[in-house]
């Protein structure tokens, strides 16, 4: 089994991120190594698209080592990160007889991971959880233990921190991913460069064509680098008391776009791609960004076929109101992650709302 292993260092809750082609075939061994017992039933949460290709093969291979599984299959898409779908999965888990030694396996992208993780965090006050990511974006969402569902008024407002026991990232699953979802995944890969590593951004620019075609060697490198950036920050600041907020570059805008479009018009990667461009414009306007940051941000995102312009139909005033419900807002004061340079971002508090509104209004007119 050819693979790379990174570790999220969190003391006794440390866990491996195992990355490689064909790893789902080795899931039983990796679960055993992570201490997941075969005595109690496992719940696999997945969505309809992923289930088609990967659910039965996973159940079969797990059965060979005595793991008993039940499955909850949800509708694909962000709208499933809801209280009603959460309620349905909880009911299925209780009816299937999951106990406190059971584990929840999230087989899918970030939607499945966030939702299944929140089920695991809350079922019988918390049971084990394993991430089996199948999207490129999930190199980010499967690491770090943020689990959540959405509220119609705001994204990820109902959630917990609940770390997985292991992340098993079978990169061969990415070959069935629609191109729009590949692009969305690159938004988070690019974000990991923009927040911490200018050389990685240059590498992503130089190799965009081959990465877009999912060249396996380069893709593995991009995923490893993205996971490594995330793992290092999470290891330092698990519950976002400080540095972890930097992972939210573009997200205060992006989450507002998602909530205001009823979690349907833009996917998460597209929303944060636009959000990162607007954050760069705000940074230039308040005078903290080096010259060229906006242009370079837009350029690298465009190479991965991501949108960079204001989403049609949304008003700056409504976006600002939605941004105030962001989790970084404290006492009504907005805090934004803004770039100073490519590879260097900061959390800036108390930005004048008028500046944000002015930048957004110019975007609408552009
Ligand atoms: P997703 O889970 O909706 O997957 C995107 C689409 O691809 C879906 O239609 C899905 O069915 C399909 N799909 C998944 N794997 C496939 C495969 N291998 N082949 C074919 N189709 C496949 O979306 P996503 O982009 O993976 O995740 C977005 C979510 O992640 C958002 O809700 C976002 O808030 C969350 N997120 C969470 C964190 C975190 O730290 N918890 C970080 C970043 C993003
Ligand atoms: N996506 C932001 C974080 O994991 O902290």
Image: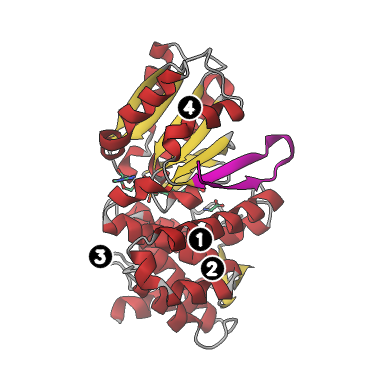
Residue 193: mark: 2
Comparing 141 with 206, the one in front is: 206
Q: Which badge, 3 or 1, is on the more N-terminal residue?
A: 1
Image coords of residue 15 (percent x, y) = 63, 39
Q: Residue 177 versus residue 217: which sits nearer the camera?
A: 217
Q: Position of residue 149 (x, y in %)?
A: 43, 39
Between the C-alphas of marks 4 and 2, the distance is 31 Å
Q: Which residue is mark 3?
A: 313
Q: Residue at x 37, y 68 (%)?
A: 210
Please provide percent x and percent y for residue 350. Answer: 61, 68
As measured in the structure, the alpha-carbon distance from the residue carrying label 3 to the one carrying label 2 is 30 Å
Q: Quadrant of residue 229?
A: bottom right
- Which residue matches tag 4? 104
Q: Is residue 122 visible?
A: yes
- Residue 17 in magenta stretch: yes
Q: Which residues are magenta?
A: 1-19
Mark closer to the observer (3, 1): 1
Q: CA distance from mark 4 to mark 3?
A: 39 Å
Tag 3 and tag 1, C-beta contact below 8 Å: no
Disc 2 C-beta below 8 A from ligand 2: no
């Amino acid at each position: 089994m050819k693979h790379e292993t990174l570790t999220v260092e969190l003391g006794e809750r440390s866990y491996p991120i195992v990355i490689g082609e064909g790893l789902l075939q080795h899931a039983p061994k990796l679960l055993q190594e992570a201490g997941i017992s075969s005595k109690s039933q496992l719940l696999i949460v997945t969505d309809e698209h992923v289930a088609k290709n990967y659910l039965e093969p996973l159940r079969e291979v797990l059965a060979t080592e005595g793991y008993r599984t039940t499955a909850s299959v949800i509708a694909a898409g962000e709208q499933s990160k809801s209280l009603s779908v959460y309620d349905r999965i909880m009911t299925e888990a209780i009816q299937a007889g999951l106990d406190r030694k059971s584990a929840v396996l999230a087989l899918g992208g970030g939607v499945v991971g966030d939702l299944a993780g929140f089920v695991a965090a809350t079922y019988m006050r918390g049971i084990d959880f394993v991430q089996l990511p199948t999207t490129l974006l999930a190199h980010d969402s499967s690491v770090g233990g943020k689990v959540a569902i959405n509220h119609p008024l705001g994204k990820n407002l109902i959630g917990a921190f609940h770390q997985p026991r292991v992340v098993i990232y079978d990169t061969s699953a990415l070959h069935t991913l629609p191109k729009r979802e590949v692009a969305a995944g690159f938004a988070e890969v690019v974000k990991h460069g923009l927040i911490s590593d200018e050389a990685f951004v240059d590498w992503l620019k130089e190799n965009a064509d081959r990465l877009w075609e999912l060249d396996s060697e380069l893709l593995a490198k991009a995923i490893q680098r993205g996971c490594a950036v995330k793992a290092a920050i999470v290891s330092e600041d698990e519950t976002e008391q400080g540095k972890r907020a930097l992972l939210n570059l573009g997200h205060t805008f992006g989450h507002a776009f998602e909530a205001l479009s009823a979690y349907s018009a833009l996917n998460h990667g597209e929303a944060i791609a636009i959000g990162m461009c607007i954050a760069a414009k705000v940074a230039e306007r308040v005078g903290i960004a080096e010259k060229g940051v906006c242009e370079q941000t837009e350029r690298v995102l465009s190479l991965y076929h991501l949108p960079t312009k204001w989403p049609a139909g949304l008003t700056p005033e409504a976006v600002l109101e939605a941004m105030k419900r962001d989790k970084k807002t404290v006492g009504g004061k907005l805090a934004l992650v803004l770039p100073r340079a490519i590879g260097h971002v900061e959390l800036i508090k108390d930005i004048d709302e008028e500046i944000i509104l002015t930048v957004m209004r110019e975007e609408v007119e552009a």
